[in-house]
């Protein structure tokens, strides 16, 4: 940039994108300084290298703003956990399910954990049935990534947001074959018109006696 450019000749692009032409480096620097702008090398591999006249500080500021906006749009997926008990009350179950639904709507993964205590370990099927209910209640917004499995004294299920496939394009219904076959028949019928009867004109004159 500016005095750091050591090439004797460069192709100069003006501040508004116009082609200035090939100039010596001193002339190009003078062209930029007269406009209180910077001479920035944008394509060093070209022959001759391409330089643009611009406000480099403003350019860097705009680039940083674009980068910040792009980072804000990017979503970082988090792993959330919802803990359940095999004998959970319906009210508590609905509260937990709503939390899981909210996490999935935010495009986060959700780990559902059913923890057993004491003699509850004798009936692990209750935990599997509970997680089957969870999957059914959230099937419209989530899908299973890792099915339910035992991990020590717990059963763990992992769900992720459901991906909605694009709708296929609707095809126009084909014209019925009967109508297509009928069209030429109608046309042929219309062309075979019966001649109008002109009896008086067609009858020959009687010979005169």
Image (tube, rainbow, N blue to C red):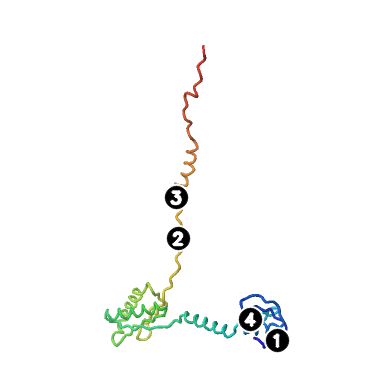
Q: Are marks 3 and 2 in contact (CB under 8 Å)?
A: no
Q: Nearer the viewer, residue 59 or 37?
A: 37
| Disc number lying in front (1 or 4) | 4
Q: Quadrant of the N terminus?
A: bottom right
Q: Could you say whether the residue bearing mark 1 is in a helix, strand or loop? A: loop
Would you name the residue on which mark 1 appears?
A: 6
Would you name the residue on which mark 4 appears?
A: 53
Task: Give the residue at the far top of this rendering.
Answer: 209
In this rendering, position of residue 2 left or right of residue 157: right
| Disc number lying in front (2 or 4) | 4
* Mark 3 or 4, nearer chain start: 4
Q: Residue at x 70, y 83 (%)?
A: 27
In this rendering, position of residue 48 left or right of residue 148: right
- The x and y percentages for residue 64 are 53, 84
Q: Nearer the viewer, residue 195 or 188?
A: 195
Question: How many other residues sit within 10 Å of disc 4, few (<14), some (14-19) or many (≥20)?
Answer: many
* Mark 1 or 2, nearer chain start: 1
| Disc number lying in front (3 or 4) | 4
Q: Residue at x 66, y 75 (%)?
A: 19
Question: How many other residues sit within 10 Å of disc 2, few (<14), some (14-19) or many (≥20)?
Answer: few
Q: Could you say whether the residue bearing mark 3 is in a helix, strand or loop? A: loop
* Mark 1 or 4, nearer chain start: 1
- The x and y percentages for residue 16 are 61, 77
Would you name the residue on which mark 2 appears?
A: 170
Q: Which mark is residue 176?
A: 3
């Amino acid at each position: 940039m500016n005095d750091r450019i050591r090439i004797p000749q460069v192709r100069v692009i003006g501040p508004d994108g116009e082609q200035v032409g090939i100039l010596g480096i001193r002339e190009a620097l003078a062209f930029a300084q007269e406009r209180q702008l910077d001479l920035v090398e944008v394509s060093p591999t070209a022959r001759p290298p391409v330089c643009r006249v611009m406000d480099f500080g403003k350019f860097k500021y705009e680039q940083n703003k674009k980068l910040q906006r792009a980072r804000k749009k990017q979503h970082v997926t988090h792993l959330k956990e919802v803990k359940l008990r095999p004998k959970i009350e319906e009210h508590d179950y609905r509260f937990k399910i709503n939390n899981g639904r909210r996490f999935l709507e935010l495009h986060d993964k959700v780990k559902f954990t059913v923890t057993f205590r004491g003699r509850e370990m004798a009936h692990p099927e209750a935990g599997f049935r509970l997680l089957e209910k969870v999957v059914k209640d959230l099937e419209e917004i989530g899908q299973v990534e890792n099915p339910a499995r035992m991990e020590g004294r717990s059963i763990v299920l992992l769900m992720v947001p459901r991906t909605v496939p694009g709708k296929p394009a609707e095809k126009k219904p084909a014209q019925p074959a009967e109508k297509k076959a009928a069209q030429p028949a109608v046309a042929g019928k219309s062309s075979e018109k019966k001649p109008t009867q002109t009896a008086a004109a067609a009858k020959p004159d009687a010979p005169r006696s």
